[in-house]
Amino acid sequence: MAKKYWLFKSEADVFSVDDLAKSENQTTYWDGVRNYQARNFIRDEMKNGDQVLYYHSNSDPNAVVGICEIVREAYPDFTQFDPASDYFDPSSKAENPAWLMVDIRLIRKLKRPVALQKIKENPELAQNKLVMRGNRLSVFPVTKEDFDEIIRMSETK
DNA sequence: GCCAACGTTGGC
DNA sequence: GCCAACGTTGGC
């Protein structure tokens, strides 16, 4: 099965790529996805070895900052059962969890972040969901072409 | 801080 | 099942 390519959003002051770099095995669980469309991507399509662009949203600057891979496929997001968590969902039942998570491991930080502004200026990326207004999914698929183009942008002027 | 976009909720 | 109200996201 062919690898898939994804973009994961995180706010830099909540969990940045540097936080990920400092994590054990440079690996983290991806908690807090509370959108059904995003959940379905996690449940149905994300496979070990899939490649992930790590993007800082609500940050300065907003940018793709790293490359990760999926190292554990969908399993229940335990924060949905934790009343102390911001992500607590009292309607979710342990025997049928509503929300799932994957684990990702940092492959490397990009040499230079690729700013949203630069992505918008690149006509080859005009179809990428990142530049489309109103896209609020925290995880979504990107094409291999877009993935490669963003990495290329980080390595060239 | 503002506001547009859009998903979710709840009254009917 | 419709749809208005509300809450959240995220760029600027």
Image: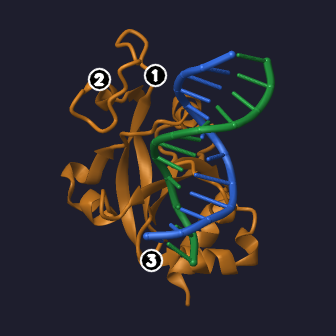
Chain colours: A orange, B blue, C green
Q: Looking at numbered disc 3 in the image, what kind of residue is underneath it?
A: Pro
Dot 3 surroundings within 10 Å: few (below 14), some, or many (20 or more)?
some
Q: Position of residue A5 (x, y in %)?
A: 58, 51
Q: Earlier in the sequence, mark 1 or mark 3?
A: 3
Q: Position of residue A89 (x, y in %)?
A: 37, 26
| Label 2 SS | helix
Judging from the image, mark 1 belongs to the subunit labelled A
Q: Earlier in the sequence, mark 2 or mark 3?
A: 3
Q: Position of residue A97 (x, y in %)?
A: 41, 18
Q: Earlier in the sequence, mark 1 or mark 2?
A: 2
Residue A61, labelled with which disc? 3
Labels 1 and 2 positioned on one and the same chain: yes
Q: Nearer the viewer, residue B6 or A22?
A: B6
Per the image, the residue denoted by label 2 is: A81
Per the image, the residue denoted by label 1 is: A98
Whether the residues at callouts 2 and 3 have beta carbons within 8 Å, the answer is no
Judging from the image, mark 3 belongs to the subunit labelled A
Q: Give the residue drawn at x 33%, y 63%.
A: A17
